[in-house]
Image (tube, rainbow, N blue to C red):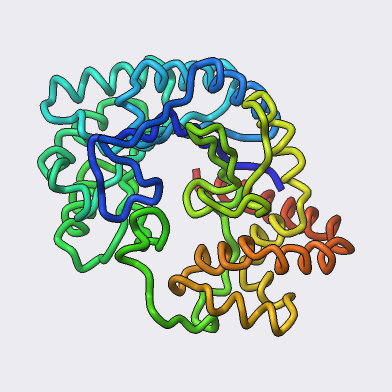
Amino acid sequence: MRYNTLGIQVTNTCNMACRHCITDSSPTARGDLTWPQIEAAVRSAAPHIDGVCVTGGEPLLRRDLTLRTIRLTRELGLRSSLVTNGYWARTPAEAGSVWHALEDAGLQKLAVSFDRFHDRIVSGASMEVLLATGAGTSIEMQVQYCGDRTDEAYRIAEKVAARYGATLTTAEVLPFGRGRQIATRRSVDVGTVPDDPCGVVVRPVLTPEGELFTCCGPARGAAQNSPLRLSIDATDEVGAALSAGATNPILNLIYSKGPRALFDRLSPPVRERVSKRLLDGSICSLCRAITDDGEAVAELDEVLERDRLRLVALSAVMRAAQDDLATRSA
C-alpha cells in the first residue's frame, strides 16, 4: 500500500467553529506544529508518499508555516495541496495577494470547504471572489461540500464551481468531532453500510499533538492500540511509521475492500458487539467501531496474517490501476 498524501495539520485553531467539524477546530482551540516538526515529518515521509496536504484548523492563520511547508514539498518533488475555508477572500485585492503567495510557493491544488456550516462567515460572494481570482493562476481548484445536497449552500457551491472551472466534491457529515452531535443515529443496521473500499486510509495526517493517524479525519481520536494510529515518539519517525503501516494487513484490506470485509471476518460475538457501536451507516463509523475494539483487532491480526502478502499485492494492483486511470483522464 502506497500513501497518496501526508496531511500536515499545522494548527487546531480556526476562525470558525462549525457544527460538523471533524477536528473540533475553533477560535479557542490551541495547538500548532513547529517548523522543525513539520520539516522532519515531511523529509522522513517523502519516500513513502506522493504529496503533502496542508490543513488545519485553518492553515492560513499560520501563513508562514503553511508557505514554508509548500516550498519544502516542491523542493522534494512532491505534489502540494491545501485545504482552507477561504476566509481571506473578502476582497479581490486580499484574495489576489494570497493566491500570488501560494502560487509563488509552488502550491498545485487548493481545496476550499463550503457548505451551510461555513456560509455565515464565508458567503457565496466570498466564494465568487476566491474562485474568480484563483482562476487566473496555475493552481487547480476544488470546492469541497459537506452535507445535504438540498441545501441552498449546495446550489451556490455547484454554480460557482462550474463558473470558474473548479471541481466539486461532496461528502456526508460524519459522527466524529463536533459532527457527532448532528450525525449520530439511534439505530443502525450494519447491513446498510456500503460495501466499498476506502481510499482515505492512504491519506495519513500528522496532528499538532504530534500524533500520526492513517486517515485525514475519522481516525483522529482512535483507540491507543488501533491500527489507525501509527506510533511515533518524534516527527522524524513518520517515514518509518508509514513504512510499517504499509504492510499492515488490516489497513490493506480496508484500502482494497473496505471495513465490511473486516466485519465479515470477525467471529459472531464480536460482530454483534461491533454492530451495537455504530454511530451511523457510514463506512467510517464501521471502521472505527471495529478498529477501536481490541478483541476485534486481535482476531483480525490472526486471521489476516496468512494473507498479508496477498493483501499488499492486491493494494498495489489497485493503486496501479488508479494511477493509470488518472493518467488517461489527465
Q: Is residue 80 above or below residue 181?
A: above
Q: Position of residue 16 (x, y in %)?
A: 23, 41
Regarding residue 327, the answer to whether it shows in the image is no
Residue appearing at x 53%, y 79% in the figure? 276
Q: Is residue 81 above or below residue 255?
A: above
Regarding residue 283, the answer to whether it shows in the image is yes
Q: Is residue 126 above or below residue 199?
A: above
Taking the image as shown, residue 114 lies to the left or right of residue 176, namely: left
Instruction: From the viewer's side, name the closer residue of 54 and 288.
Output: 288
Instruction: From the viewer's side, name the closer residue of 175 and 109.
Output: 175
Q: Image quadrant of residue 234?
A: top right
Taking the image as shown, residue 66 lies to the left or right of residue 202, namely: left
Taking the image as shown, residue 220 lies to the left or right of residue 50, namely: left
Residue appearing at x 60%, y 34% in the figure? 50
Residue appearing at x 16%, y 53% in the figure? 156
Q: Image quadrant of residue 212?
A: top right
Instruction: From the viewer's side, name the closer residue of 243 and 311.
Output: 243
Q: Position of residue 208 (x, y in %)?
A: 48, 32
Q: Position of residue 220 (x, y in %)?
A: 51, 48
Instruction: From the viewer's side, name the closer residue of 155 and 191.
Output: 191
Residue appearing at x 59%, y 22% in the figure? 77
Q: Position of residue 144 (x, y in %)?
A: 33, 49
